[in-house]
């Protein structure tokens, strides 16, 4: 009886604590001796109160550095910088998400064919997954099977060429693969070539083919890509020059045209060396855009003109940790969680809905080698 009563009490307390908009948060991490991480971790988050629980291990897996969640909320995908069983390159893993506690169970792994996988995304129909290989400078596409697992690569494209920086751009370095709002095209940022490759998608077949490309200024090193909510503009953070480029997007033609490129740093710090950007996120209201600055350890906050896509830097908010990598806004746009690779932490920020500026809530959780954050809404 005592155990039953205690269980009921704890259940009531948990429901009370997380009454309101309840989300699960998944953290992708580098697994090594320094970080102490064992794989993917998970927390609970309440967007009404801002309560964030301490992360706990969801599944053991090697260096799941980037995550993507299936539209059905049943599956999660992760790229890992390790070789799969008997094939070269790294691996992309498929997991089922437990509907009761959110824990992950491996379905299968497929080879990324190229080396150094760093990004994974899922198309809007949930039929196709796509990955980018930084080390190999390539991209690949997969069919998503009925059980949520992944096929072997249905498409593999090796980028070719070099950029203007002989040290960083001697060859291609694909860094991300994203999908257009209408699900017709995929966009692969290649740091080594200063290009955003555009691919025409065939989700049913798990395939894509070359369509065109957008170009950033020489030596920029494009990394991650985000669409404006209106679908008319896209933003690319340039890792090497600490800038962000706005593109106008023609949905009918599937083309990108540069609008402008601006710095992610305050003017006084623009001569600093050894800095790099990491992530780009557009606010769901379309008024703000955010970029993480590694080593500078800040999040650059921009206002966005929804008519032109032009950005104005208004804040460099402290990331509250070392080497801010990926960060994510919750679906309400009221909160941001920032992953700190070197601090082995993640920080919760409050987003001012009128200005877009960030303020630290004082809440920081420990999660080793944290480099990716994903929210999953719970029904």
Image: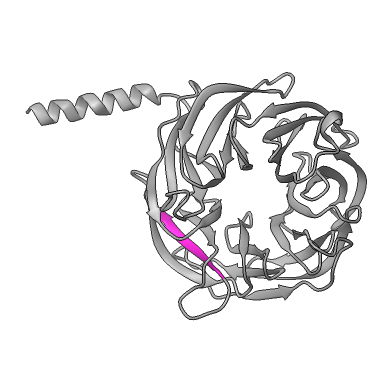
- Total numbered labels: 0
Rendered position, 326 above or below 104: above
Quarter of the figure with the C terminus: top left
Q: Answer with left or right where residue 245 lies relative to residue 28.
A: right
Q: Is residue 22 visible?
A: no
Give whichever of 191, 108 is nearer the camera: 191
Based on the displayed image, in which of its 4 quarters is residue 61 positioned? bottom left
Q: Between 154 and 366, which is closer to the camera in this rendering?
A: 366
Residue at 50 percent across and 45 percent down: it is 27
- The residue closer to the viewer here, 317 or 250, is 317
Asked if residue 251 shows in the view, the reply is yes
Q: Residue 44 location in percent, x, y?
A: 42, 35
Q: Where is residue 195 in the image (x, y as percent from the top left)?
A: 84, 60
Task: Kindly indicate the quadrant of the structure image that contains residue 179.
Answer: bottom right
Extent of the magenta region: 90-98
Percent across and percent down for residue 207 are: 67, 71
On screen, residue 248 versus residue 75, left or right, reads right
Residue closest to the eye, 122 or 59: 59
Magenta run includes residue 371: no
Residue farthest to the left, as pictured = 1
């Amino acid at each position: 009886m005592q155990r039953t009563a205690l269980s009921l009490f704890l259940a009531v307390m948990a429901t009370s604590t997380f009454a309101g908009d309840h989300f699960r948060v998944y953290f992708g991490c580098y697994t090594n001796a320094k970080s102490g991480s064992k794989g993917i971790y998970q927390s609970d988050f309440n967007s009404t109160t801002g309560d964030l629980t301490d992360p706990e291990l969801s599944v053991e897996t090697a260096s799941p550095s980037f995550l993507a969640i299936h539209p059905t909320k049943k599956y999660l995908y992760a790229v890992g910088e390790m070789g799969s069983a008997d094939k070269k390159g790294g691996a992309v893993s498929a997991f089922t998400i437990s509907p009761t506690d959110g824990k992950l169970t491996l379905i299968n792994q497929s080879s990324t064919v190229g080396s150094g996988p760093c990004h994974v995304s899922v198309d809007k129909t949930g039929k196709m997954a796509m990955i980018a290989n930084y080390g190999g400078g390539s991209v690949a596409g997969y069919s998503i099977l009925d059980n949520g697992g992944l096929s072997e690569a249905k498409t593999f494209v090796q980028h070719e060429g070099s950029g203007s920086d002989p040290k960083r751009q001697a060859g291609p370095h694909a860094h991300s693969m994203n999908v257009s709002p209408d699900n017709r095209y995929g966009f692969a940022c290649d740091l080594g070539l200063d290009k955003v490759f555009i691919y025409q998608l065939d989700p049913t077949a798990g395939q894509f083919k070359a369509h065109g490309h957008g170009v950033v200024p020489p030596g920029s090193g494009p990394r991650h890509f985000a669409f404006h909510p209106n679908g008319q503009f896209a933003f690319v953070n340039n890792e090497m020059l600490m800038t962000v480029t706005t593109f106008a997007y023609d949905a009918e033609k599937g083309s990108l045209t540069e609008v402008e490129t601006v710095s992610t740093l305050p003017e006084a710090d623009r001569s600093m060396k050894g800095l790099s950007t990491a992530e780009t996120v557009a606010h769901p209201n379309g008024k703000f855009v955010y970029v993480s600055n590694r080593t500078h350890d800040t999040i650059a906050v921009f206002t966005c003109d929804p008519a032109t896509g032009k950005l104005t830097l208004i804040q460099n908010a402290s990331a509250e940790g070392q080497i801010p990598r990926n960060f994510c806004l919750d679906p309400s746009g009221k909160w941001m969680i920032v992953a700190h690779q070197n601090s082995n932490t993640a920080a919760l920020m409050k987003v001012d809905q009128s200005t877009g500026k960030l303020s630290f809530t004082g809440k920081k959780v420990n999660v080793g080698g944290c480099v990716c954050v994903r929210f999953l809404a719970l029904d």
